[in-house]
Amino acid sequence: MENSKKLALVTCYFQLNYGSQLQAYATQLLFNKMGVENETICIDGIQNEINKAKYRYFLSRIWDIHTVKDKWATVKKALAERTKGREYKRNIAMRRKMFYDFSHTMFRISKRYNSRDEITAEAHNYGGFVVGSDQLWLPSNIEGDYYSLNFVPVDIPKIALSTSFGISRLPKVQAAKAAKFLKRFDFISVREVSGQKIVKQLTGRDVPVVCDPTILFTAEEWGCITKRERFYNEPYLFCYFLGNNPEQREFVRRVKEITGCKIVQLQHCDEYIKSDVEFPDYAPYNVGPAEFVQLIRDAEYVFTDSFHASVFSLLYQKKFFTFRRYNNDSVVSTNGRLYSLLALVGQENRLLKGDEYVNDVLVRTVDYNKVHARLAELRSFTKNYVKDALAKSGIDYDKNYR
């Protein structure tokens, strides 16, 4: 029996992160195009409760050197706002406003819920809950107990769309918790093969690997959020590095010497990196998610250690190179999603360390006919997964959607 109740989307639409907001928007856009009424659950009233649980998790990991290094970046960023002067503070505030404006104009947000119990009490007003995608099942998020959908009653359909654990193996405590909440999901799809293995190990279920929601739309379709004019009228190399790896910047400098292109970099996104201050020719801060896509669209080359910057480089048929953010595959490493993405489209040779000879690397070409044929297959497979999940959940959608 089909129901006409709206879908509840549980995403990280509020994160001050380009990939997070773009994948959350893509999730909403998918259901809009499928003719399914939906709204994204407002997190404002329960954010503090979730954050407290995450802080307790990080405190419990205080003796783990990898976790400490990972979180030190966040501390450095907060300290920089207090110590690096008014201009830096204004710049960060400008970027934050760009994220705020995007999240408050592009998303259909639910009313404010002040606790998870309050959502539980009104959960039957929804036809189902969809969680995804991004790294929503990281150990810290498992402790936050929001993206687990544990607050959703058993009889309401629960769908995981391209959700990621972010890492290749879970710590013992979080693995036990994941084993329980995963069994409550009616439908699970993950973004990486490593996540597929985790679900199999914890639940015995064989689940599909589907594409990130941002991949579901072509460059032409993403034009709905971007301006036509260029951000910079001269040729440029676009850099979006979240990790602090100086050898990667040196590689880009060598490319600049050969190409003569200026360097445009989005700076201090995940942490304050002192050595980046003198690195680019241009360091814009008036860049929200839409402008982020625009900067990739018009770049001569893209250099990044970001999953979503790599995705949009593929969509816009860019000459791009992806670097490992982490030097090893430690417990906090998120390199796996980069390996998985590039392997899916047969572009493993775009993954660099930074010590390669530039001339040897720049001659590497991408057969975008093959890449986009593979992306089309992934889109079709993912959409069919979603259609099947909706149909079996009794949720009506536009059957003509392709």
Image (cartoon, rainbow, N blue to C red):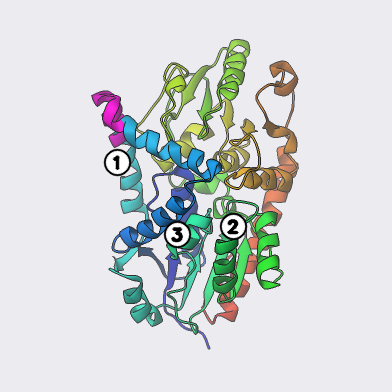
Tell me the kind of residue under disc 1.
Lys
The kind of residue tagged 2 is Pro
The amino acid pointed to by label 3 is: Thr
- Residues rendered magenta in the picture: 81-93
Q: Quadrant of residue 313?
A: top right
Instruction: Examine the rendered structure and indicate whether residue 130 appears above or below residue 326.
Output: below
Say few, some or many: other residues with alpha carbon within 10 Å of mark 2 (under 14 / 14 to 19 / 20 or more). Answer: few
CA gap between label 1 and label 2 equals 36 Å
Quadrant of the snapshot with the C terminus: bottom right
* Local secondary structure at mark 1: helix
* Of pointers 2 and 3, the one earlier in the residue sequence: 3
Which residue bears the numbered disc 1? 97
Q: Earlier in the sequence, mark 1 or mark 2?
A: 1
Q: Is residue 273 left or right of residue 103?
A: right
- Is 88 included in the stretch rendered in magenta? yes
- Identity of the residue drawn at 59% across and 57% down: 171
Kindly report the distance in space between the C-alpha atoms of the residues bearing marks 2 and 3: 23 Å
Residue on which disc 2 sits: 171
Residue drawn at x 53%, y 89% is 1
Residue 8 to residue 77: above or below? below
Q: Report which residue position mark 3 lands on.
A: 11
Q: Nearer the viewer, residue 370 or 228?
A: 370
Q: Residue at x 45, y 17 (%)?
A: 281
Q: Secondary structure at mark 2?
A: loop
Considering the whole magenta stretch, tell me its main secondary structure. helix
Return the x and y of residue 260 as percentages of the image width and height.
Answer: 57, 12
Whether residue 397 is visible, yes or no, is no
Which label lies toward us, 1 or 2?
A: 2
User: Left or right of 200: which side holds 111?
Assistant: left
